[in-house]
Amino acid sequence: MKTVAIICEYNPFHNGHKHHIDQIRRELGEDTRIIAIMSGGFTQRGESAVMDKGDRARAAVECGVNLVLELPFPYSASSAELFARAGVSIADSIGIVDLISFGSESGDISALTEYATLTASDEYEELVAELLDRPENAALGYPCVCEIAFNRLYGEKNGITLTPNNILAIEYIKALKSFNSKIKPHTVLREGAAFNEDEVVAGSLQSASAIRKELLSGNISVLEYIPDEAKPVVLDAIRRGAFPCDMERLAPAVLSFFRLSPSDAGENFHDAKGGLYNRLKSASLEADNISALVRLSETKKFTNARILRAVWCSFFGVTSSDVRTLPEYTQILALDGIGRACLKEIREQSRISVLTKPTDTFGLSDTARGQKALSDRADSIFHLTRPRPVSGAYSLTYTPFVKKD
């Protein structure tokens, strides 16, 4: 019997995620235990999640995940490298994971591993830094510069393109190697719509981007692309005024922050350096929502995701130290009967704190307590993105969803 971790967002849980879970069990056995390490309220692309982490975790367990642990903020809203590093750190630290599984456009674990190994070299990293500093490359995105560096050093024989899921796959493998982890990487070929596709296309496997876009516009017909087991969770969240969550509801607070903050504060915030903070501050005087703030801050150097991550790092006061220090805790969000057995083993072997109830916070180390406090602040603000906002203390009293056998 294998235990597999999936580092994920499930924003929202859809048919493609169910396909991933089903494929893992087809390949490794129906008794495979699956642990999801899932983002909190703010995601790797810098957006707020469309649904509260508790509801997303419940949907995941209803659809076959056995245990959901949290990848807390700010790791959840970090670059691919730091997002992957934190997620792999949690998987490695809990002590029971055999494999980490991820979707990829490649589907070839050998090719991805070779790419990850080659790009972990000092020679490669130095060439990427050199190319990024050249003015003629200012219009190129980071993935394009990385591909140029790889091809210059190693040729194009590998065949890996730096598409979104391949990038994360490579970072997961790099992180496993850097931790000297016994966990093995495993990939499932991504099928259906492309990761960044924001329109509904033919077929049953849509991108999360397209589903979110339709849900935020009020089109709940896209629930047909969500597994039947997850639909009651979404409908219940709609009934409670907890869905869909929309970061634009935070626009007055975010714009006020940038308009009122001092001009010299930007060097303190992760992802906001290099003049980006001052661009955001200047753009905030003209913008009337968060999307406009991002659009007015755009340059060839910064992607939209990077700009959004800079927004939240600035707003919540996140420093580079906050995201580069490995997580020393995780929180249980949902589980079933098999997940309870996993939890028992984790309690015996874990090298980090695993919280199951609010009072567990009192037993945390000073570092972990600080990490939890930062994540709790982000959660308290996230709940203002709901159609019907709730108390900022909501997450402080959260208890895991337990699926009945």
Image: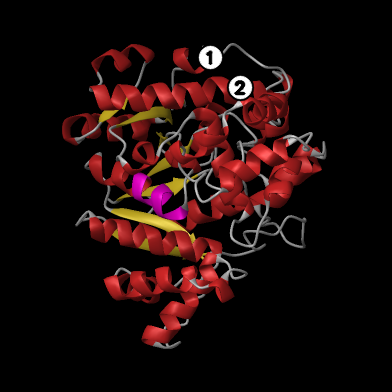
Q: Is residue 114 above or below residue 348?
A: below
Q: Are marks 2 and 1 in contact (CB under 8 Å)?
A: yes
> Residue 383: which disc?
2
Please provide percent x and percent y for residue 123.
30, 75
Closer-to-camera residue (380/23): 380
Alpha carbons under labels 2 and 1: distance apart: 8 Å
Quarter of the picture containing the C terminus is: top left
Instruction: Say whether residue 309 is left or right of residue 199.
Output: left
Please provide percent x and percent y for residue 24.
42, 57
Q: Give whichever of discs 2 and 1 has the lower sequence position.
A: 2
Please identify the quarter of the rendering in which residue 46 is found.
top right
Determine the main secondary structure of the stretch shown in magenta: helix
Please identify the quarter of the rendering in which residue 220 is found.
top right
Query: Which residue occupies 51% across, 29% down?
Result: 316
Start and end of the magenta stretch? 80-86
Q: Residues within 10 Å of mark 2 (few under 14, many from 20)?
A: many
Q: Is residue 15 magenta?
A: no
Closer-to-camera residue (329/402): 329
Q: List the single residue furthest toward the left.
A: 348
> Residue 258: which disc?
none
Q: Residues within 10 Å of mark 1 (few under 14, many from 20)?
A: few
Is residue 351 at least partly visible in the picture? Answer: yes
Instruction: Say whether residue 205 is left or right of residue 266.
Output: right
Q: Is residue 82 above or below residue 104?
A: above
State the SS at label 1. loop
Q: Amino acid at mark 1?
A: Tyr
